[in-house]
Image (tube, rainbow, N blue to C red):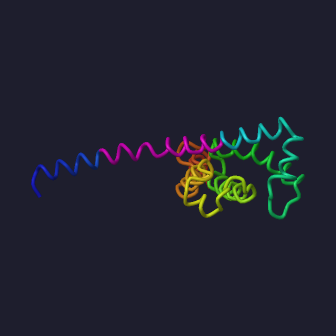
Amino acid sequence: MNTMMKRGFAIHDDFAAALTRLGPLALLLFRAWVALAFWRAGVVKIEDPYGTQYLFNNEYHVPLLSGDVAAFLGTWIELITPWLLVVGLAGRLTALFLFVYNIIAVISYPDLWPHGFWTGLIGDGFNDHKVWAMMLLAVIAWGPGTLSLDALLGRLRRRSPG
């Protein structure tokens, strides 16, 4: 292999290593973006409990739950889990929980997919939910990253004797 090719590979490897160091920041930004979206939704729900109950009893069709129970759970899930996600505590489990919750939200509100669920999934329907799902999948796959309480607790656990 000639010197020019070796130098090209070395530059590539250095560049790839530098970009790899962005991973923890990217995961933190993913967690913060999704957490903020869910937190805002929870704040809207708790600020207007009568409107929330109306929506859950008349517009949303949450499977297996009454509208009142779904409204209560939905509000508190959206107010509590974003904090776990953003600080990265039980990161993978929280991301998985919100991933499933996001799917249930899309399925429960047919107005998000007026041209059919599969058309919306493949096309341009419910784009926010699809972006959140992809960000949550990254956290599920790679964990919350080194900028998280999970990572801090893992380091502390490894240092403790016994």
Picture coordinates of residue 39, whole percent (x, y): 71, 40
The answer to whether residue 38 is left or right of residue 161 is right
Residue 22 on the magenta segment:
yes
Residue 78 or residue 80, whichever sits in front = 78
Furthest toward the front, the residue is 115
The answer to whether residue 155 is left or right of residue 39 is left
Query: Which picture quadrant has residue 21?
Result: top left
Residue 25 on the magenta segment:
yes
Part of the protein shown in magenta: 15-35
Question: Quick check: 77 above or below 65?
Answer: above
Q: Residue at x 69, y 44 (%)?
A: 38
Image quadrant holding the C terminus, namely bottom right
Image quadrant holding the N terminus, namely bottom left
The dominant secondary structure in magenta is: helix
Picture coordinates of residue 146, whole percent (x, y): 52, 45
On the question of residue 160 being in view, the answer is no
Residue 155 or residue 131, whichever sits in front = 131
Picture coordinates of residue 158, whole percent (x, y): 57, 51
Question: Quick check: 95 above or below 39?
Answer: below
Residue 26 or residue 73, whichever sits in front = 73
The answer to whether residue 79 is left or right of residue 6 is right
